[in-house]
Image: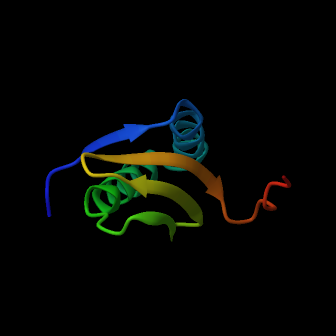
Amino acid sequence: MANRRIDWSRQALLQFNKAILRIAADSDQNAENIQAEILEKIEGIVSSYWAFELHRLRIAYYVGAEVIRILRVRHTSREPLGY
């Protein structure tokens, strides 16, 4: 697999940070572990366009030739957005 740069949308980065802060309110150690696990999973992405769920967070992404773009981070209990 080629090394790809990871690029977060502003919205996804804010959502991710907010989720980690919410977890840290209960346990700093859990927040650090979950953050590390999610970031490790993102680094290993190889498919072209999809999402994955980990610790009740759904991370939507797109994989281009040189970049992995993180599009959105949402808790799985939230309703899908209407368009």
Give the farthest residue toward the right: 82
Q: At which x and y percent is residue 77?
A: 74, 65
Q: Quadrant of the N terminus?
A: bottom left
Residue 46 visible at all: yes
* Total marks in image: 0
- x 15%, y 51%: residue: 3
19 vs 82, left or right, is: left
Give the farthest residue toward the front: 65
- x 53%, y 43%: residue: 16
Q: At which x and y percent is residue 13?
A: 50, 36
- x 59%, y 35%: residue: 11
Q: At which x and y percent is residue 70?
A: 46, 47
Scheme of colours in the image: rainbow
- x 54%, y 30%: residue: 10
Residues 41 and 82: in front is 82
**In this rendering, is residue 44 above or below 82?**
below
Residue 54 visible at all: no
65 vs 23, left or right, is: left
Residues 26 and 20: in front is 20
72 vs 67, left or right, is: right
Q: At which x and y percent is residue 47?
A: 35, 69
Residues 38 and 60: in front is 60
Give the farthest residue toward the left: 2
**In this rendering, is residue 18 above or below 42?**
above
